[in-house]
């Protein structure tokens, strides 16, 4: 397996520190013409910890990740994987977990 990039390790480090199932934390990193996309996979029971109230925790992780990416002149986005049929309703007015940092206006 290829060596993980710093931004990918950074996300895993932070998320492992806040979840109850750190061994289930995994990421995939894809680079394309739009930048870097890191997809975060976690135990379904930990989704609330990672997203936080009104998306505050996810927003904070994305903000930090944007700063890490900026140091390398890279546009880094974070997607939190939610399997189909997850308990969290997609109709809730909370921010989408798939929104990029750029969408937050930061």
Image: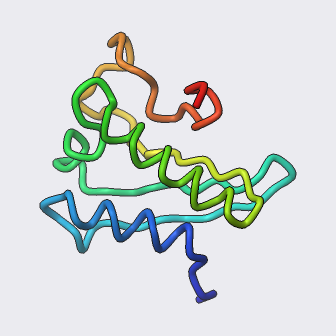
Report the number of numbered marks: 0
What is the quadrant of residue 71 in the picture? bottom right
Percent x, y of residue 14: 33, 63
User: Is 90 placed above or below 6 here?
Assistant: above
Residue nearest the observer in this picture, 73 or 90? 73
Quarter of the figure that contains the N terminus = bottom right
- In the rendered image, the residue lying farthest to the left is 20
> Left or right of 56: which side holds 67?
right
Instruction: Establish if 4 lies above or below 39.
Output: below
Residue at (64% x, 59% y) in the render: 69
Q: Position of residue 41 (x, y in %)?
A: 39, 57
Name the quarter where the C terminus is drawn.
top right
Q: Position of residue 78 (x, y in %)?
A: 53, 48
Residue at 32 percent of width and 13 percent of height: 92
Q: What x and y, as percent, mark residue 16?
A: 26, 66
Nearer to us in this view, 7 or 92: 7
22 sits left or right of 60 in the view: left
Scheme of colours in the image: rainbow
The residue located at (20%, 50%) in the rendering is: 46
């Amino acid at each position: 397996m290829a060596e993980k990039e710093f931004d990918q390790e950074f996300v895993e480090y932070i998320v492992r520190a806040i979840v109850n199932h750190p061994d289930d934390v995994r990421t995939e990193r894809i680079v394309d013409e739009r930048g870097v996309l890191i997809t975060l996979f976690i135990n379904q029971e930990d989704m609330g910890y990672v997203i936080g109230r009104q998306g505050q925790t996810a927003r904070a992780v994305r903000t930090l990740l944007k700063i890490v990416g900026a140091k390398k002149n890279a546009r880094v986005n974070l997607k939190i994987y939610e399997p189909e049929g997850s308990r969290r309703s997609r109709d809730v007015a909370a921010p989408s977990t798939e929104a990029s940092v750029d969408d937050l206006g930061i």
